[in-house]
Image (cartoon, helix red, strand yellow):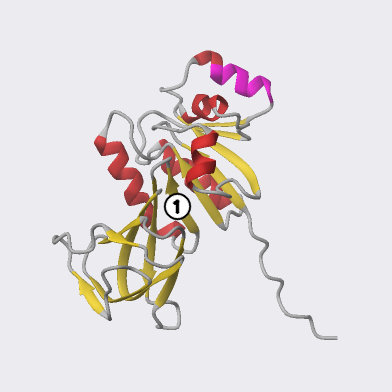
Amino acid sequence: MPPGPAAVQAARHVLVVADGDVPDRAALDAAWPGWDEDVVEVIAADGGFARALAIGLSPTVLVGDLDSLEPAHADAAAAAGVRVLRSPVAKDESDTELALLEALRLGATRITVLGALGGPRLDHELANVWLLGHPALAALDLALLDARTRASLVTAPAGDGSPVVRQLPGPVGATISLLPFAGDVVGVTTRGLRYPLRGEPLRAGPARGLSNVREREDASVSVERGRLLVVEAAP
């Protein structure tokens, strides 16, 4: 008998906690209901271990050079059976990048990142946003989250050359910014937003896509070609 069709890969939601600002769970629950739904692994990136513990998360993996983590926390992690993947201080990747790549190795199909935004260093925050465009992570559902902001990337075209549609569900009146990421974006069409785009380009540089407003709970955006950064503000 010939083999049956290949099984669809089961969804695997992995949570990565970096060492930026991490809001408490109540704030995350209020802003983004279901943000931690079906999480199967929690990966802490260096100092993100302490931040994860502070909001009641239990990391299963600790990744990084551990230069931002108190030795007592690292010792406690090892004693608790957390898998510790220590890297050299002199390396090409950030600790957050290493955590994302470990999530990919563990079979993640969806990754939510806390602690990627805010913090004392703008360069770290920008580098974390740029990780949305990491080529190894292109096929994943990847979002950066805090109590005010959710950032994700739409990359088009699809494998068959067709436009990519991203649903943008949420409360009416919330702000959504659509920003070209690392180059121009072509053929942007929106539904349910106050300032519509109809197959139009968004050029790198001008701020045209900033501060649109959701007018329908089932808003969406379609992109023909390019990479579009979607930044949603919590109501």
Measured as percent of width and height from the top left, residue 103 is found at 55, 47
Question: Count of labels shown?
Answer: 1
**Residue 208 image-quadrant placement:** bottom left
**Which residue appears at 66% of the width and 65% of the height?**
9
**Residue 180 image-quadrant placement:** bottom left
Q: Residue 183 magenta-drawn? A: no
Measured as percent of width and height from the top left, residue 87 is found at 46, 32
Q: Evaluate whether residue 186 shows in this view.
A: yes
Amino acid beneath label 1: Ala
Magenta stretch, residue numbers: 73-80
Residue sticking out furthest to the right: 1
Whether residue 128 sits left or right of residue 84 in the image: it is left
Measured as percent of width and height from the top left, residue 215 is found at 37, 66
Q: Nearer the viewer, residue 150 or 211?
A: 211
Residue sticking out furthest to the bottom: 1
Which secondary structure lies at badge 1? strand
Quarter of the picture containing the N terminus is: bottom right
Residue that carries the numbered disc 1 in the rendered image: 143
Q: Residue 74 magenta-drawn? A: yes
Whether residue 92 sits left or right of residue 84 in the image: it is left
**Which residue appears at 61% of the width and 23% of the height?**
77
Measured as percent of width and height from the top left, residue 86 is found at 51, 30
Q: Evaluate whether residue 46 shows in this view.
A: no
